[in-house]
Amino acid sequence: MSSATAHVRPRDETPAVWLRRKYREFRRTRPFWGGLLAMIAGVPILYFPYAHLSLGGVTIAMSTTAGAGSLIIGVLMMLLGLTAWFQPAVRVFAGVATTLLTLVSIPVSNLAGFGMALVPGLVGGAMMMTWAPLPEPKAVELAEDSAHNTAEAQAEPALSAEPAEPAEADTAGTAVLPVIPAAAGAPDIESAEHRAVNPGEAR
């Protein structure tokens, strides 16, 4: 569903239904799930280097010299997820950067947050790179019309091509000459030829 297919809010629509519809439109017009996975992947990368775990009354601090790198990677991945949400035009860059930061976090940030950020980061980056907006309805209609017109133009020559009728041949095998009327006082050539062919009738 693209932004062009958004419907106008009817008067009898409740706020809950309107909010749900807006959320659905927001989700379908941008790489929503890819950005969400990128932000989720940034949480364990950012959390574990600064976490203090308690095991049997013993507090374990996991802060290391890589804490600054983990902070930068985690914050950048969250920002890239938000960028994919609100600037879908740069989704490919955000997806590539998320994938690279996820791979860099393996040696830098406790094996990508003990593996908890590895799968969401890689899947979210791939989803952002491969997402594409739906075509606008007008563009789809124009494409269908052009394809229909092209098919009709290709079918017309085949329908209009009819077998030509054979020309009627002259049974006598001779050309047909025009009839010229005889002038006044001129001898009758036809009767003379007829008498020459049939001399018996002349007598």
Image: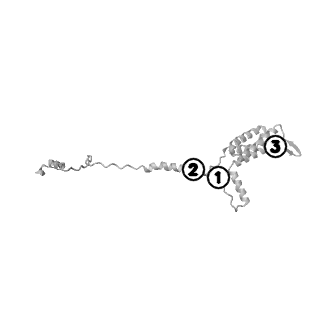
For the residue marked with disc 3, what is the amino acid?
Phe
Q: Residues within 10 Å of mark 2 (few under 14, many from 20)?
A: few
For the residue marked with disc 1, what is the amino acid?
Ala
Q: Residue at x 80, y 41 (%)?
A: 71
Q: Is residue 14 left or right of residue 157?
A: right
Q: Earlier in the sequence, mark 2 or mark 1?
A: 1
Task: Report, in whole angstroms, how far the alpha carbon at label 3 lies from the one at label 2.
Answer: 54 Å
Q: Is residue 126 among what the camera can see?
A: no
Q: Which residue is mark 1?
A: 4
For the residue marked with disc 2, what is the amino acid?
Leu
Q: Residue furthest front?
A: 184
Choose between 95 and 25: the one closer to the eye: 25
Q: Nearer the viewer, mark 1 or mark 3?
A: 1
Q: Is residue 61 left or right of residue 104?
A: right
Residue 118 placement: quadrant = top right
Q: Which residue is mark 2?
A: 142
Q: Residue furthest right?
A: 57
Marks 1 and 3: CB-CB under 8 Å? no
Q: Which residue is mark 3?
A: 48
Q: Residue at x 88, y 44 (%)?
A: 58
Choose between 36 and 8: the one closer to the eye: 8
Residue 16, percent from left and from top: 73, 59
